């Protein structure tokens, strides 16, 4: 796949089936950990401006759904609000409907869990068709993989942050992921 191309000749951000095979296509996400959920809560509560409303998005696989549900319970337990939980398929014609639901209401932040291909497809649609901002987006460990960045294409995920299974953090910038090996050791 030529990951430097943002859209196909038709103008669609869709990643063609054959383009996502091979080394650039990581497998299914592993189950989330309590350290991961706690670290996401820490990132969101430390964010400035203050985050109160978080829309949660996830792929339709069981692991991503469970991670999203765990986060929603934890976030609401801190007094935060979740105006919407949006799921998306790994394969679709355009992802436009879930993208519009995901960005509706302009939440303070978005939290996402999913497979590499599903999130790459969704994020490309979000950048192409909505006012979504990756710098206000936080991901579970399953998305902290440079192959996700490669699939999504240059600048699509610029500024997105997230956490690893052990609670450490990562941030996407300049087409790369910077990992911060110890919780609390990040520049934000």
Image (tube, rainbow, N blue to C red):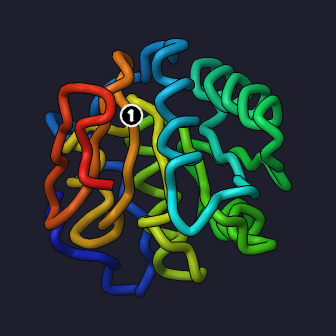
- On the image, the x and y values in percent for residue 184 come to 32, 34
Q: The C terminus lies in which quarter of the figure?
A: bottom left
| In the rendered image, the vertical position of residue 9 relative to residue 16, given as above or below | below
Q: Please give the residue where the numbered disc 1 appears in the rendered image.
A: 163
* Residue 31 appears anywhere in the view: yes
- On the image, the x and y values in percent for residue 111 come to 58, 47
- On the image, the x and y values in percent for residue 40 come to 51, 35
- Give the residue at x 75% y 57%: 53
Q: Residues within 10 Å of mark 1 (few under 14, many from 20)?
A: many
**77 sits to left or right of 103:** right
Q: How many marks?
A: 1
- Give the residue at x 78% y 71%: 104
Q: Quadrant of residue 155?
A: bottom left
- On the image, the x and y values in percent for residue 64 come to 59, 28
The residue closer to the viewer here, 181 or 8, is 181
**100 sits to left or right of 170:** right
- Give the residue at x 67% y 30%: 71
* Residue 19 appears anywhere in the view: no
| In the rendered image, the vertical position of residue 92 relative to residue 184, given as above or below | below
The residue closer to the viewer here, 172 or 168, is 168
| In the rendered image, the vertical position of residue 46 relative to residue 98, given as above or below | above
Classify mark 1: helix, strand or loop: strand
**59 sits to left or right of 69:** left
Q: The N terminus lies in which quarter of the figure?
A: bottom left
- Give the residue at x 58% y 46%: 45
The residue closer to the viewer here, 109 or 128, is 109
């Amino acid at each position: 796949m030529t990951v430097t191309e943002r859209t196909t000749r038709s103008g669609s951000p869709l990643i063609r089936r054959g383009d996502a095979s091979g080394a650039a296509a990581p497998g299914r996400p592993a189950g989330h950990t309590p350290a991961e959920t706690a670290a996401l809560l820490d990132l969101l509560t430390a964010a400035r401006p203050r985050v109160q409303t978080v829309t949660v998005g996830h792929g339709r696989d069981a692991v991503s759904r469970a991670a999203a549900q765990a986060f929603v319970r934890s976030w609401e337990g801190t007094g935060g609000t979740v105006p919407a939980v949006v799921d998306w398929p790994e394969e679709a014609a355009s992802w436009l409907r879930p993208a519009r639901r995901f960005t509706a209401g302009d939440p303070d932040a978005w939290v996402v869990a999913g497979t590499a291909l599903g999130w790459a497809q969704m994020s490309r649609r979000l950048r192409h068709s909505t006012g979504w901002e990756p710098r206000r987006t936080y991901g579970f460990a399953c998305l902290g993989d440079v192959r996700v960045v490669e699939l999504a294409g240059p600048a699509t995920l610029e500024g997105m942050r997230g956490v690893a299974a052990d609670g450490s953090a990562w941030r996407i910038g300049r087409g790369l992921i910077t990992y911060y090996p110890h919780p609390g050791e990040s520049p934000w």
